[in-house]
Image (cartoon, rainbow, N blue to C red):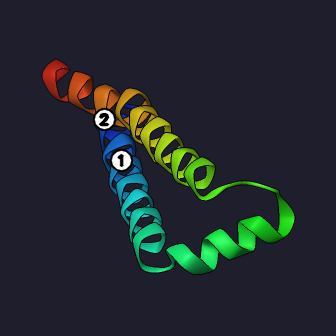
Amino acid sequence: MTVEQLRYFFGWCAMFNYGLLIFWFLCCISFRGLLLDLCRRFFQISEETYDKGMFYGIMFYKLGIIMLTVMPYFTLRVLK
């Protein structure tokens, strides 16, 4: 693969993953009660534990996007 192809790939990966992150966030905000009830049906968790789990999940996913797609994209932009 050329540097141009890798930059194109990482750019699209970053946009797709940020779209998925925004969708996850909007679902957590819009369907909070429904998702909490669904999780309570399978796991015995409190509301605070659910909120903490969603926050940590979104936070780690965002950090993963930055480290694995955004940083390589900008590195390849600088190498151009």
Residue 75 picture location, percent across and down: 24, 22
Where is residue 44, by image quadrant? bottom right
* Residue on which the image places disc 2: 70
Where disc 2 sits, the SS reads helix
Q: Nearer the viewer, residue 67 or 80?
A: 67
* Quadrant of image for the C terminus: top left
Residue 52 picture location, percent across and down: 53, 45
Residue 69 picture location, percent across and down: 38, 36
Mark 2 touches mark 1? (CB < 8 Å): yes
Question: Counting other residues with Cα less than 10 Å from the Cα at mark 2, is it few (<14), some (14-19), or many (20 or more)?
Answer: many
| Lateral position of residue 52 relative to residue 30, left or right | right
| Lateral position of residue 4 relative to residue 40, left or right | left
Residue at the spot 44% in from the left edge and 30% down from the top edge: 68
Q: Amino acid at mark 1?
A: Ala
Where is residue 79, by image quadrant? top left
Residue at the spot 30% in from the left edge and 35% down from the top edge: 70
| Lateral position of residue 43 relative to residue 61, left or right | right
Where is residue 41, by image quadrant? bottom right
* Residue on which the image places disc 1: 14
| Lateral position of residue 20 relative to residue 34, left or right | left
Q: Nearer the viewer, residue 51 or 70?
A: 51
Label of residue 77 in the image: none
Residue at the spot 62% in from the left edge and 48% down from the top edge: 49
Q: Amino acid at mark 2?
A: Val
Earlier along the polypeptide chain: callout 2 or callout 1?
1
Question: Counting other residues with Cα less than 10 Å from the Cα at mark 1, is it few (<14), some (14-19), or many (20 or more)?
Answer: some
